[in-house]
Amino acid sequence: MKPALFVLDTHVLVWFVKGKTRLIGLQALFVLSYPRARIVIPTYVFQEVQRKFGPSMDGKNGSMRLPPSALLRLVCRCSNIRVLSADPQFIACEFRLKRDIRSNRIPDQDIPIAAALMTSRDVYDGPVALISNDGPLVKWAMSAGIPTIWSQANPKLLPA
C-alpha cells in the first residue's frame, strides 16, 4: 500500500513556520516533522500567505518573519513536498466546485484547497488526507470521504 499524501491548508503551514506548534496538534505536527511524509501544498496557499501573512510594515502579529517568496523557495527544496499548480485538471475541478457551491457548502476561499484535494485524489493511487483547522472545509472533506487531521490542538473546536 502506498503512503498517504497530505494536502495542507494555509493556516497549518503558517503556524508551522511561525513555530506555533500548540495550535497545530500532535498528529499534524508529526506529519509535518516526518521527513518521509508526502506533502502537497496548493499554489493558492502561497497566494493566501502573501495576501494575509506577508511581512507588514505596521508590525501586525499576523505577519511572518519569513517572506512568502523565501518560504516558497524553501518548500521547493524539500524532497517530500510538492507544490500543486493550477493545471487544467485542477481548474476544471475548481469550476465544478464553484458550480455546485450551494450543495457542497464550501466557502469561496476554500475552493482551491478542495480542488487540490480532489485533484490529488484523482492522480495519486494511494490515500489522500487533509490537514486543516478550517471547520467548513474539514466538514466538506469528511463528507467527500477524505480523511482529515484536524490541526488545532483544542478538541472542543473539532467540527460537528
Image (tube, rainbow, N blue to C red):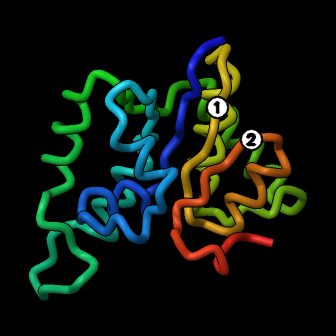
Pinpoint residue 142: horizontal percent, then vertical percent. Answer: 79, 51
Q: Residue at x 67, y 26 (%)?
A: 127
Q: Which residue is mark 2?
A: 146
Q: Which of the 4 quarters of the picture holds residue 22?
A: bottom left
Residue 76, placed above or below residue 7: above
Placement of 3 over or under 133, stated as above or below: above
Query: Is label 2 in a helix, a strand or a loop?
Result: loop
Separation of marks 1 and 2 at Cα, in angstroms = 7 Å
Dot 1: within a 10 Å radius of its alpha carbon, few (fewer than 14), some, or many (20 or more) residues? many
x, y percentage for residue 107? 68, 66
Determine which residue is flagged by label 1.
Answer: 128
Against 131, residue 133 (above or below) is below
Residue at image position (28%, 60%) is 50
Q: What kind of element bears circle 1?
A: strand
Counting every numbered tag in the picture gives 2
Q: Nearer the viewer, residue 28 or 78?
A: 28
Q: 56 left or right of 129? A: left
Tag 1–tag 2 contact (CB < 8 Å): yes
Q: Amino acid at mark 1?
A: Val
Tell me which numbered mark, 1 or 2, is placed earlier along the sequence.
1
Identify residue type, mark 2: Ile
Q: Measuring from the top left, give residue 159's x and y in whole percent.
A: 73, 70
Residue 95 location, quadrant: top right
Task: Give 86 or 70, whichever is nearer the viewer.
Answer: 70
Which residue occupies 33% across, 61% down?
14
Residue 142 is tagged as none
